[in-house]
Image (cartoon, rainbow, N blue to C red):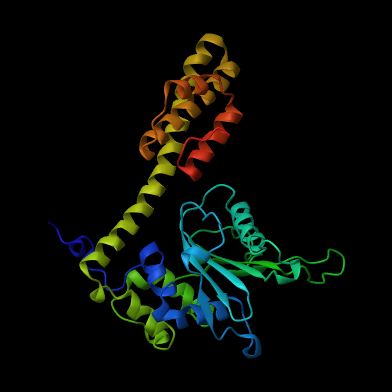
Amino acid sequence: MLHPKTLISNVIFASPKTDFVFKRIFGDEHHKGLLIQFLNTLLELDEAHQIISLNYLPPEQRPPVEDLKYSIVDVKCQDMTGRYYVIEMQILEVDAFENRVVYNANKMYIAQLESGKGYETLCDVFAISICDFMLWPTPPKGDSRVPMLSRWQMREKQSGEAGLSQVQYIFMELPKYSSGEQPKSLIEKWAYFFKEAPNLNAIPSFLQEEPFIEAFEVAKTSGFSLEDWAAYENSLQRDRDFGGILKKVQKDGMAAGMAAGIAAGRAAGMVAGKAEGRTEGLRESIIYLCDVLGIIISIEQHAALEKMEPEELLILRERLKIQRQWDLA
């Protein structure tokens, strides 16, 4: 049997953007200090308000928050003041990503209220998303209006007064950091670590300090067991598969829609042909997606597909991408 290490034999440091390594660095009790320092940097907390200790939420006590699909998730914790943190690594840009971040953060906030408890027991929630794509792209002219590290909470419209801070959102858009520049701030150093770790043969001089020395040590592949290598390769493969599925579905749907549209247009006019082609293309993309995800389409479901309008087909396709199961409810 081929040793998994031979598949990526030149890698000195594993990618911290993968599920396996991300959890190894930030979700391991032995390296809790890394998560504490990372959170203090992202939240830009002064010394008087910094997190000094936290507890990971055990699986049986985690609020029933549905993880964001197509992301590297599952580092959830609570500090000594009661505040909750959800830290997620989002690899792929998917539709309505911001909506799902808001939805999941608020579900965690609501899930705290157990039977018999009052609203005063609710603690703040911080939803932290590290994105390997731009949520708010840089305008064609000038610098981006939204910086690489952005924090979001409610403000009163006229006065600008901040309030209702019970749920806050922090986004770190990695592409907004230019890898060609030497990082200066702590947040830039973390961005460099996420982006460049698997491309390095040694720890750069500007990262020869804690917490980065420890983070690199955890990501060092020389310490991987056979099982670690297999888990790491599975993480890489899963990311590639998800990206390939989305690209293939989009490409096939467009191609099928164009082909069907042209054929129908010749017979019934270009306008009607485009509409029919779009509908047929959506059906074909759904069938292909089900095949890739291993979802068996029953005779009844095939019949339902033939009767669905384009808007309904779009909704079904998005549900399949997210839920990975057939659900018409």
Residue 326, percent from left and from top: 48, 35
Q: Quadrant of residue 135?
A: bottom right
Residue 176, percent from left and from top: 53, 66
Residue lying at the far top of the rendered structure: 267
Answer with left or right where residue 55 lies relative to residue 218.
right
- 268 in relation to 184, above or below: above
- 68 in relation to 158, above or below: above
Residue shown at the point (71%, 68%) measured from the top left: 166
Could you tell me if residue 175 is visible in this image?
no
Residue 6, percent from left and from top: 18, 63
- The quadrant of the rendering that contains the N terminus is bottom left
Answer with left or right where residue 135 lies relative to residue 28.
right
- 71 in relation to 156, above or below: above
The residue nearer to you, when weighing 217 against 322, is: 322
The residue nearer to you, when weighing 147 against 72, is: 72
The residue nearer to you, when weighing 77 against 262, is: 77
- The quadrant of the rendering that contains the C terminus is top right
Q: Quadrant of residue 98?
A: bottom right
Residue 156, percent from left and from top: 83, 66
Residue lying at the far right of the rendered structure: 158
Residue lying at the far front of the rendered structure: 116
The residue nearer to you, when weighing 249 against 75, is: 75
Could you tell me if residue 267 is visible in this image?
yes
Q: How many marks?
A: 0
